[in-house]
Image (cartoon, helix red, strand yellow):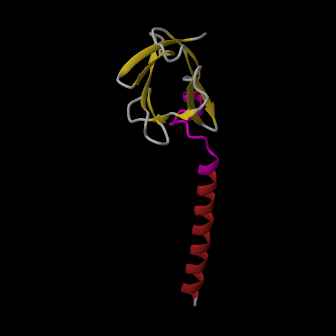
Amino acid sequence: MQVLRTLTIFVFFLAVYATSVAQSSGNKPDDSKPDSVAILQEYVGTYNVKGNNDFSKAIVTLEGGKLYGHTDTQTQVMPLSPTKVPDVFSITSPDNSVDVTVTFLRNETKKVSSIKIYYNGLETRGEKEK
């Protein structure tokens, strides 16, 4: 009987301890991971594209923690899906008719300064508006 009582008390304190650890780790910010929304915000902006007959501006927005892109001649906003390569995203139209690769380029201070867009076998670039 004494063993059962001791075991019950041990299990109770173990449960209290586990709950305490779970709550404290859930409330603590994880400093090891950068804020993904802050990182995505670096890409947001309007990029002036030169030498392209299809569009002159590429617009990147952030909504609900996800990047979206469109051009000044396009009304449909498309999600930018991250790839395994940093600063590189892909866009695929719902009917798979358009496959676009978007690469954000950084300057010497590591800030996003321009964009490279590859689509339909063509590559075009644009500078980020300040």
> As rendered, which of 112 and 4 lies closer to the eye?
112
Q: Residue drawn 59% across and 50% down?
A: 25
- Quadrant assignment, res 21: bottom right
Residue, x 54% and y 23% (percent of image)?
43
* Residue 18 rendering spot, x and y as whole percentages: 58, 62
Whether residue 35 is visible to the viewer of this picture, yes or no, is no
Q: Does residue 68 lie above or below 104 as drawn?
A: below
Stretch of the chain drawn in magenta:
25-40
Q: Is residue 35 above or below residue 115?
A: below
- Considering every residue shown, the one lying at the far left of the view is 121
Residue at the image position 61 percent from the left and 76 percent from the top: 9
- Residue 31: % across, % down: 55, 36
Magenta segment: does it hold 117? no
Residue furthest bottom as drawn: 1
Q: Which quadrant: the N terminus?
A: bottom right
Residue at the (49%, 18%) spot, across then down: 54
Residue 92 is situated, as x and y percent measured from the top left of the image, at 45, 37
**In the rendered image, which quarter contains the C terminus?**
top right
- Could you tell me if residue 43 is visible in this image? yes
State yes or no: residue 36 in magenta.
yes
Relative to 36, residue 14 above or below: below
The residue nearer to you, when weighing 49 against 76, is 76
